Image (cartoon, rainbow, N blue to C red):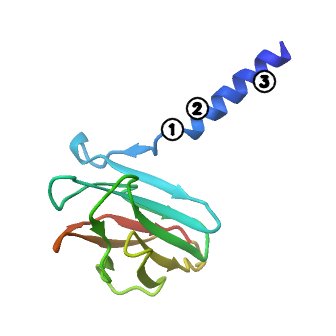
Amino acid sequence: MKQAAALAIGVTLGLSACSTPPIQTWGNDASIARTRVNCFDAGLCKVVVEVSDSECKIIKVTPDDMHVYRQNVIVRWEFKAGTKDYTFPSDGITFKSTQSELIDGKPIGNGQFYIWFDSNPVSSPPAKRTFDYTIKVERNGTSCTYDPAIVNQG
């Protein structure tokens, strides 16, 4: 009986590790559903960029909104596995307003990744700060963009 219970717990934990990020819907329109991920990782928060094979187009970014709970982490954007012909240019991730919490943004790995260092300073009282940004990628000399957000939970 103990083995069956242990197996059931193991299967449940294994399946939950494979689950997709939670979906939240703002407003009454299900067509504007966005993915949100809470990043509690002490070193790295990843954003996956999915692009079109036939034209310069960003199809999806997972998560749309990254909620960062730790201080001093790297936020890294990367293309979905198997992506070809796309790169992040030097202005691949730009913030829509002036901010001082995310610093030293740059492409790395021959433009296959883009990183920003997120200091996410602790505020008193804790305050949520949202940073809307633009993702810009290039394919064969053509640029295309997408507009998600980072939410610091300091």
Q: Residues within 10 Å of mark 1 (few under 14, many from 20)?
A: few
Q: Residues within 10 Å of mark 2 (few under 14, many from 20)?
A: few
Tag 3: amino acid: Ala
Which of the pair 55/96 is nearer the observer? 55
In this rendering, position of residue 15 left or right of residue 23: right
Q: Residue at x 70, y 21 (%)?
A: 8
Q: Secondary structure at mark 3?
A: helix
Which of the pair 32/110 is nearer the observer? 110
The Cα–Cα distance between marks 1 and 2, rounded to whole angstroms, is 7 Å
Q: Is residue 82 above or below residue 77?
A: above
- Cβ atoms under marks 2 and 3 closer than 8 Å: no
- Cβ atoms under marks 1 and 2 closer than 8 Å: yes
Q: Secondary structure at mark 2?
A: helix
Which of the pair 29/100 is nearer the observer? 100
Q: Earlier in the sequence, mark 2 or mark 3?
A: 3
Residue 47 locus on image (x, y percent): 43, 61
Numbered circle sitting on residue 2: none
Residue under label 1, please give it.
19
In this rendering, position of residue 74 left or right of residue 84: right
Tag 1: amino acid: Ser
In the rendered image, which quarter is residue 25 located in?
A: top left
Q: Secondary structure at mark 1?
A: loop
In this rendering, position of residue 51 left or right of residue 152: left
Tag 2: amino acid: Leu
Residue 39 locus on image (x, y percent): 55, 59
In the rendered image, which quarter is residue 80 located in?
A: bottom left
Residue under label 3, please give it.
6
